Image (cartoon, rainbow, N blue to C red):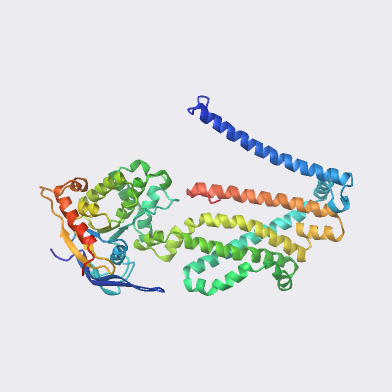
Amino acid sequence: MGVPRIELRQVGMRYLTRQGEIEALADISLTVAPGEFLSIVGPSGCGKSTLLSLIAGILRPTAGQVLLDGQPVTGPSRKVGYMLQRDHLLEWRTVMGNCLIGPEVQGLDLAAARRRVKQLLAQTGLSQFQDAYPDQLSGGMRQRVALVRTLTIDPDILLLDEPFSALDFQTRLTLADEVWTILKREQKTAVLVTHDISEAISLGDRVVVLSRRPARVKAEHIIRFDAPRRPSPLQARSAPEHNTYFQRIWEELQSRDAE
Amino acid sequence: MMPSSPHSLAYRRYLRALRIRLAAVRATQILLLGALLALWEVAAARHWVNPMLTSRPSVIWQTTLKLAATGALWTHLAVTLRETLVGFAAGMAIGLVVAVALWWYRPLAEVLDPYLVVLNAMPKIALGPIFYIWLGEDRSVYGMAVAISVIVTIVMLYTGFQAVDPEKLKLMRTFGATRLQVLRKVLLPASLPTLMATVKVNIGLTLVGVIVGEFLSSRAGLGYLIIYGGQVFQMELVMTSVVILAVISAVLYLAVSWLERLVSRLLHLPIRE
């Protein structure tokens, strides 16, 4: 399968604070293939977000190595887009203005970027809100704009840090479906961090379960459905396999046994 | 109001009650002012109080007209306004630059922290004589105006910068933004409400600095007029200057509030009260 898009080699992360040392990650090795959707679940505060920050290059690991397409990560990369729990739209910019922040910062061709934003807004059903301000949008719409903002710079890899958790349940399901469809169509590689087991199973091609801090890879599940093609996240939630995986992962998260 | 209002009768009654309430508050405010002025006038006219000490509204009005006619009013007003606006602009500009420097280079903030705390707590008015000796009669007023506003500006703005959501800054970093880009595109726009709050505080503080500066050294301005009136025991001159000062303060404050609302609306930012 060639060079993995993302590779973590025995990555460890230790935070030094006045209160002491916190070992967030210990000896994590992972690979993500191009086009793969990897879900990571773990108990809260186990260092899931740290993992994403390492891949994004805004943190350096204290042990091991992070590679993107075989190249060691040295800083924020244009290959990577990051989506956070909250949308963090800039209130003083229109939807279009918010989506252009990435290209502006990276000095890309703004005319081309604007065309791409228009396309993406159309795909997410937000075309008529191009000139609206964030305070005029609902939570779901705001998070869609955040997705468009991330996709505008056309990253190969998307890091999703609990991007649906601040939304109400219904919006969460529909938006997860939309995001998944867009990412699959655009053949993006994605890493989703979540504490919602169903979300992890329904979106992921693979689910990695992390242990309590310091986080290690505790288990790994390749998600397969008995269907001619991969069901959408919404369909996947009601597939019989979903419950089997759910049960297994639930137990793994519950058990505090020897690691 | 639209002729065929879509609101229910109860809602229209509610709106009407709100309007009446607001009108009642305004009317009471005006009546209170009128009553106080009338009491002042009558008390001085009937010698319930010594008019030499209190002056009286009618005399203040006449003094104002007289000063306006001779042009002295405009000269002194212009001096005080110019000093206030220049001092205010300088205080804001210096404060903003220093606050950005503190944000940019964190060790600087750590080192300067105790100095800022002490300078902020210290009564800047105590520096007046020093400015007088260092800067001379006219420029010491500006020194006073800047001294009294600049520290507050630095502290308020720097605190505002730190209150900007760190996740927003993290997001910018994931796009590979430089520090200058983060400053220009996120930090400064996000801090505009803080900046407006600082402007509101500063316009009043600068006026304090200017008046104190004029007390100490100047040969013109409303502060000078007040001190001069006191020395020659012309209470009507003192009172007139104080009243004009009150009017200036109100006008400046209203102007700043209006500017704040305008900026907030243009930038879709919430108004901070």
Image point 51% across, 65% down: which residue?
B100
Image spot of residue A187 (x, y percent): 20, 54
The quadrant of the rendering that contains the N terminus of chain A is bottom left
* Depicted B241 relative to depicted A33: above or below: above
Image point 78% across, 53% down: which residue?
B241
* Depicted B205 relative to depicted B244: above or below: below
Seen from the viewer's position, the closer of residues A4 and A209 is: A209
Q: Is residue A4 left or right of residue B129?
A: left
Image spot of residue A45 (x, y percent): 32, 63
Using the rendered view, name the quadrant where residue B127 is placed.
Answer: bottom right
Seen from the viewer's position, the closer of residues A185 and A194 is: A194
The quadrant of the rendering that contains the C terminus of chain A is bottom left
Image point 58% across, 31% down: which residue?
B16
Q: How many marks?
A: 0
Residue A237 seen in this snapshot: yes
Residue B221 seen in this snapshot: no
Image spot of residue B223 (x, y percent): 76, 59
Q: Is residue A38 left or right of residue B115?
A: left
* Depicted A36 relative to depicted B131: above or below: above
Q: Is residue A241 left or right of residue A93?
A: left
Residue farthest along the top direction in this orientation: B4
Q: Is residue B271 left or right of residue A26?
A: right
Image spot of residue B83 (x, y percent): 69, 60
